[in-house]
Image (cartoon, rainbow, N blue to C red):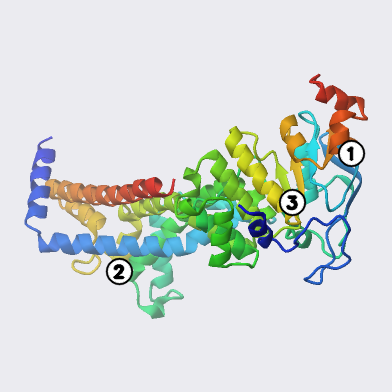
Amino acid sequence: MQNFGEAFVLAFGLVLQADPDLIEIVLLSLRVSLAAVVLSCAIGLPLGALLATTRFAGRGASIVALNALMGLPPVVVGLLVYLMLSNAGPLGWLQLLYTPTAMIIAQTLLITPIVAALTREVVEQLQHEYDEQFRSLCVPPGVAVRALLWDSRYALLTVALAGFGRAIAEVGAVIIVGGNIDHLTRVMTTAIALETSKGNLALALALGIVLLSLALIVNALVMSLKTGANHAHG
Amino acid sequence: MPMDEAAALHREPTVAAAIPTIMADGKRPLLPLEVRGLVYRAGLRNLIDELDLTLHAGPLSVIMGPNGAGKSLLLRLLHGLLTPSCGEIRWHDAAGQGEDVRRRQALVFQRPVLLRRSVRANLDFALHVSGRRSAARRDELLRHVGLSERARQPARLLSGGEQQRLALARALATEPEVLFLDEPTASLDPSATAAIEGLVRQAHAAGTKIVFVTHDLGQARRLAGEVVFLHHGRVAEQTDAMRFFDQPESQAAADYLSGRLVF
C-alpha cells in the first residue's frame, strides 16, 4: 500500500513539473495510438458497414472470423509485424522496424478487427431500422452504406474509443516492433514495463496513473461530444 | 395550402380517369394495375390467398379489412418490398420491372422511419436518391407540409403528426405516380389526422394515384373514392365508396361495417 501513496505523489509531481521525458512519452503514446485509431477506422468502418449491409456466401463465417480476431494476442501481432519488417522479411527494405511507424502498423492490425466487428453490430442494427425505407426509395448500396455510417456516427465514436482504449493500453506488440528505445519508441506502456522490471514500482505505478488519466480524459471528451450531439440531434 | 400550389408539386395537373397512352417523359403510365392469383405464403399459411385486384388511375382507393386481412402485406407486395409466393402483379407499363417500377411509387409507413438528421436533410436525402436534388424544391415541400419553421430541427424530435407529414413530404419528393399509405394516421390525434388527410387529398387532386390503408371507418368515408375490402387475404369486395358504405355486397363487409368482428 505504501507504493500506492508514493505513486500518487510521484505521479502528481511528474505532471506538475511537466517532466520533459514524461511529456515526450505521453505525446508519442498519443501519436501512435491516435494514428492507429484513424487508420483502423479508415479500414474498419467501411469494412464493418459492408459486412452489415451485403449478403454473400461465407458472410456468417467472415463475421465469426472477424469477431474472433477481436481477441488477437498483441504479442502474436507484434511477432507477425516483426517478421514482416525485419531485414529478412518481405518488407525489410522499408527499414521500419524499431520506429513509431512500425508501432502504428502493429496497433492498426490489432484494433482494426475491433473497429470492424463493432461497426458491423452498430450499422446492422440501424440497417434493420432503415431497410424497408431504403428499399422503398431504391437507395443505391453505396449511398446506403454512407448514410448508415453517417447516421450512426455518434455510436461509432464509442467504437473508435474502444479501439483507442485497446491501442493505448497495449504493450506486447509495440515492445516487439518498437523495442522501447528511449527518446525514439518509448511509450507509456513500455515505460511502465521497463520501470517494473527495474524494480521502480512507484515510478511504474505513477506512469500507470498518468496513463489511466489520459484514457479518462479522452473518454470524457468523447462522451461530452456524444451528449452534446444527442441533445442537438435527438 | 391552395390547390394550385399543391398541383405545382406534381407532374400531372388533374385526376386522370382516362389512361393516357404516353406520359410527358415518354414513359407509359403505371396504371392500371392488374393483380391475378396473388399468393403470399408464410409457413403453411397463405396470408394473401389467390387475390385478384385491378386498380385504375382516378379514384382514391382505400383498402379496408379486419386485423390480419393482409392489408399492409398487400401494400408491400404491390410496392415490391416483398416477393409473392406465386401469382402476378402486372403494371400497365410492363417494360420496367423491380426497382424501375418502385422508383415511380412511394410508400408511407404507419410508423415513419426518419433518418437521424435534420428535417431538411431527410428531404435532401430523398431528393438526392431520386435524382431531383434542389434546395428550392425542398423548401417548397417543407412549405407544403407546414414544416418550414422546423427545417433545421432534428427529425426525430418532431411530434408524431409532424413526423408523418415529413414522411409524406419525403414520399412526394420522389414525384410518385402511385402513393401507398399504410395507416399513416393510426397513432395521430384528430388535428394531425386532418392535416395528413388534407395533404393526401391535395396529392390526389394533383394526379397522384392514392392507395390508402385504414381501419378508421370515418376516415374511409371522408377519403375513399373506391373501397377495396379484404378478408382472409382475398378481395371480398371492390366497389364505389358510397355504395360500399350504403349497401355492402359481401357479408364480411356488412359485418365489418356493423361492428361485428370478422375473423
The chain ID associated with circle 3 is B
Q: Are marks 1 and 2 on the same chain?
A: no
Q: Is residue B253 left or right of residue B129?
A: right
Q: Quadrant of the C terminus of chain A?
A: top left
The residue under the point 82% across, 64% down is B96
Residue depth check, mark 2 versus mark 3: number of the one nearer the observer: 3
Q: Which residue is mark 2?
A: A100
The residue under the point 35% across, 59% down is A173
Q: Is residue A224 left or right of residue B256?
A: left
Q: Secondary structure at mark 2?
A: helix
* Residue A227 x/y as whole percent: 35, 46
> How busy is the neighbourhood of tag 3: few (under 14 within 10 Å), some, or many (20 plus)?
many
* Residue B144 x/y as whole percent: 59, 54
Gap between marks 1 and 3 measured at Cα? 18 Å
* Residue B23 x/y as whole percent: 81, 67
Q: Are marks 1 and 3 on the same chain?
A: yes
Instruction: Name which residue type carries label 2.
Output: Pro
Q: Secondary structure at mark 3?
A: helix
Q: Front-most of A13 and B219?
A: B219
Q: Front-most of A168 and A82?
A: A168
Instruction: Name which residue type carries label 3.
Output: His
**Residue B18 appearing in the image:** yes
Instruction: Name which residue type carries label 1.
Output: Thr
Gap between marks 1 and 2 measured at Cα? 77 Å
The circle on residue B239 is 1
Q: Which residue is mark 3?
A: B204
**Residue A68 appearing in the image:** no
Q: Is residue B215 left or right of residue A7?
A: right
Please determine whether, in this image, residue B28 is positioned above or below residue B42. Answer: below
Q: Is residue B121 left or right of residue A33?
A: right
